[in-house]
Amino acid sequence: MSYLQQYFQSDRAGNSMLGALLAIAILVPILNLAVPESSVFHVSTYTVTLIGKYLTYALLALAVDLIWGYCGILSLGHGAFFALGGYVMGMYLMRQIGDRGVYGNPELPDFMVFLNWQELPWYWYGFDMFWFAALMVILVPGLLAFVFGWLAFRSRVTGVYLSIITQALTYALMLAFFRNEMGFGGNNGLTDFKDILGYSLQSDYTRAGLFAASALILVLAYLLCRNIVNSKLGRVVVAVRDSEDRTRFLGYRVEYYKLWLFVLSAVLAGIAGALYVPQVGIINPGEFSPLNSIELVIWVAIGGRGTLYGAIAGAILVNLSKTWFTGVLPEGWIFALGAMFVVVTLYLPRGLAGLITRKQAQT
Amino acid sequence: MSGLDKMRETFRRDQVWNFLMPRYTYEDVLDTSKGPILYLEDVTVSFDGFRALDDLTLYINDGELRCIIGANGAGKTTMMDVITGKTRPDHGSVFYGQRIDLLRLSEPEIAALGIGRKFQKPTVFEQHDVLVNLELSMRMDKRVWTTLSARLSGEQRDRIDEVLEIIGLKNEAYKRAGLLSHGQKQWLEIGMLLMQDPRLLLVDEPVAGMTGHETERTAELLTSLAGQHSVVVVEHDMEFVRSIARTVTVLHQGSVLAQGDMDTVQNDPRVREVYLGD
Ligand SMILES: Nc1ncnc2c1ncn2[C@@H]1O[C@H](COP(=O)(O)OP(=O)(O)O)[C@@H](O)[C@H]1O
Ligand SMILES: [Mg+2]
């Protein structure tokens, strides 16, 4: 092995995290399905779904860290790609309802019958097939990111300006998806799902399966991202972050590097959204809210940007505390999040991950 | 003159670039048989009406070490910006050899043609180790997909070691570039230029912030590069210029004020007027 490989691949914290994720991917479903409810070791279905949701957030945070932590692209619109992936999955789940809807129309989802639509819009075609929907989960966010990134990076929009237009992007999509004419259920969004791949979404087994799938996909995404940031391409990307001009004058076409990384990140965010929707059972335009995108950047900042595992830890820890906090003091959450962000920025500029690397440096 | 123009037109064919770029070789297109490697003619750049370069005409010969001096604001950095594609002139022409029109190319394309540049403010990748800085600068295919799977070959590793030796940073190879001293950063950036294996080096104020000893070593290094490379050095430090220069060009208000060897230039009454105010 080359010295460079050894040098970059000592990701101890990341490996521990992967181990933990694999362990819960196996253990949590077992503790939920096989351990009787009376036992103290039983994990309730509610908890399974809750942690499963956090895992999809963690995947989203990983996607943001890839571009923000390594390439310095601060996207404040990544919630849009997440929501698009979610809508694609939602469309598939809607078509699976078939004639079991309130109006019993075998072709049209309830909201279309309610709007007096006579036939399925063309862009809903194909979504009754899982493989097609799965493909779209990748293509829809990927294509949007490609077009958006191509325009933005070629015209060398960077820094705050880029962040602002990503906010505008997600805001515009939110307004569009609120409209009934768009054909995505207006402000109610898509909901009342029945089953996925023929398995009932109410069943504990399905939920455990979705949970395990979320954990495994997160592990795979982590490995993919780690391979990329450890490759020479990853080093070029960090070079772009630190000195874009220098990189360009060395002969790298910076805009292509940014574009491909941005597209990959958007695809990961879309997959996260697609895993999220069957677990929470609804997708509505609120997911496009600009605030969501800002909040998820805060998860990454708290966890520590530019480490990958920091983003995952940040997403899970912040959302755990959010769940706990909203139970105790609902109005207080936004202040608590703000306070955490301020404390981390002031005392832990490298986030929680900074604590680990500091400790490693000492030993 | 019109014959030369005609010939340029003949060779301004876009097909050249398509086959050229992916292979990142330029030797077969770069034509310096007439002597100069760089032709700047009537180049004008204005910023809000202010002419930073004013009908600048300048030729750099292949293999030459040329010093460019001039007061602050004379347009030296702007000239480098034009050559490397960062700034587009209002008019004028910039040719690399006889056939390559630099005004039609982007910064990465120009870099891939073997034109390397050191910035006035030392610019290295601070978060990367010295070694990685050099690795990333190496002359090779720099497209996204090839970069993803690129591995250092033994030969390339040797080249990195060689350059580490030249720039005196052997013991700092695994140090983060951000932790280097100012002078070391200047050297690292020169090392990054060497890794690109360029034909033409543009070096903007290389000895700013260096100690006397460091300055001397930089002078040696740059002098040793001339011959196989063409080197254009912009500098303020007269002692330094005197120690390396064969030909000096004095830039004043965006155009050439005087040119010749150091003594001729220093005794030129116009130069004395501008520099010494008499
Ligand atoms: N981007 C810019 N916008 C406006 N003015 C500029 C810009 N770049 C350079 N200038 C002006 O052009 C003149 C030449 O600058 P420069 O080439 O940096 O000089 P030098 O490197 O010789 O000190 C200066 O007066 C400077 O203020
Ligand atoms: Mg200057």
Image (cartoon, coloured by chain):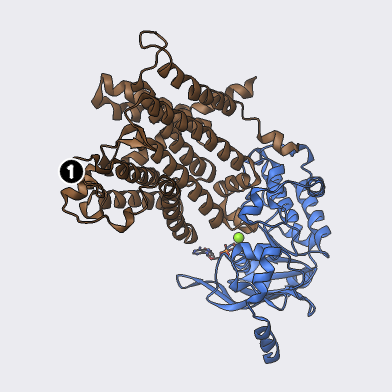
Identify the residue at horizontal 33%, vertical 56% (top origin): A123
Q: Quadrant of the N terminus of chain B?
A: bottom right
Residue A303 against residue A65 in the figure, above or below = above
Identify the residue at horizontal 42%, vertical 13% (top origin).
A35
User: Could one spot residue A345 in this view of the protein?
Assistant: no
Whether residue A221 is situated above or below residue B23 in the rendered picture:
above
The one of B95 and B144 positioned closer to us in this rendering: B144
Residue B144 rendering spot, x and y as whole percentages: 61, 54
Mark 1 burial class by Cα count in 10 Å: few <14, some 14-19, many 20+: few
Query: Which percent across, then down, holds residue A53?
Result: 38, 30
For the residue with label 1, is its CB less than 8 Å from the closest atom of ligand 1? no
Query: Is A100 rendered above or below residue A175?
Result: above
| Extreme residue in the top direction | A39
Q: Which chain is blue?
A: B
Q: Quadrant of the C terminus of chain B?
A: bottom right
Please name whichever residue, A85 or B147, is drawn nearer the observer in this view of the structure.
A85
The residue carrying mark 1 is: A103
The spot of residue A40 in percent (x, y) is 39, 8
Secondary structure type for disc 1: loop
Horizontally, is B252 left or right of A191 in the view?
Answer: right
Amino acid type, label 1:
Tyr
Taking the image in four quarters, ligand 2 sits in the one at: bottom right
- As drawn, A111 above or below B39: above
Q: Which chain is brown?
A: A
x and y, in percent, of residue A353 in the image: 52, 28
